[in-house]
Amino acid sequence: MTLGEMAEKAQQSLIGWAVVGGAGGVVWLIRRVFTNQKQIEIMQREAALRDERREEDRQTMLGIDRELKELRRDLSRGN
């Protein structure tokens, strides 16, 4: 085996490793993007649910305030 043949084999090996490494990097990047997208969607759903619960709590508090005002009015009429 001559030095030229050895260099050619080494070059092919390096190119092969570069292709495999590049393909692995692309796969990793795609997985990372999809994973982040899923996490973003989950966080958006959680935020929407929190907003709904917050609105329900506000309505409940308004109802409690109304009832409290009625109780105060009834108590003030009774005295």
Image: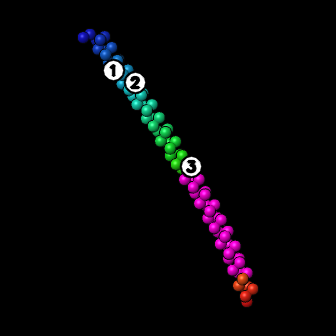
In the rendering, which numbered label is found on residue 26?
Answer: none
User: In the structure shown, which secondary structural element does the residue marked by tag 3 occupy?
Assistant: helix
Towards the viewer: 3 or 16: 16
The relative height of residue 39 versus residue 9 in the rendered view (above or below) is below
Amino acid type at circle 2 is: Val
Q: Mainly helix, strand or loop, the magenta region?
A: helix
Q: CA distance from mark 1 to mark 3?
A: 46 Å
Badge 1: few (under 14), some or many (20 or more) residues near its Cα, within 10 Å? few
Towards the viewer: 18 or 60: 60
Query: Residue at the location (64% across, 64% down)?
Result: 58
Q: Are marks 2 and 1 in contact (CB under 8 Å)?
A: no
The relative height of residue 77 versus residue 18 in the rendered view (above or below) is below
* Quadrant of the image containing the C terminus: bottom right
Query: Residue at the location (47% across, 41% down)?
Result: 35
Bounds of the magenta segment: 45-73
Quadrant in the picture for residue 14: top left
Q: Is residue 65 left or right of residue 8?
A: right
Amino acid type at circle 3 is: Gln
| Among numbered discs 2 and 3, the one appearing first in the sequence | 2
Badge 2: few (under 14), some or many (20 or more) residues near its Cα, within 10 Å? few
Q: Which residue is mark 1?
A: 13
Q: Is residue 47 left or right of residue 17?
A: right
The relative height of residue 70 versus residue 48 in the rendered view (above or below) is below
Relative image position of residue 57 (x, y in whole percent): 61, 64
In the rendering, which numbered label is found on residue 44?
Answer: 3
Q: Which residue is mark 2?
A: 19
Quadrant in the picture for residue 4: top left
Query: Residue at the location (50% across, 44% down)?
Result: 38
* Quadrant of the image containing the N terminus: top left
User: In the structure shown, which secondary structural element does the residue marked by tag 2 occupy?
Assistant: helix
Relative image position of residue 64 (x, y in whole percent): 65, 72
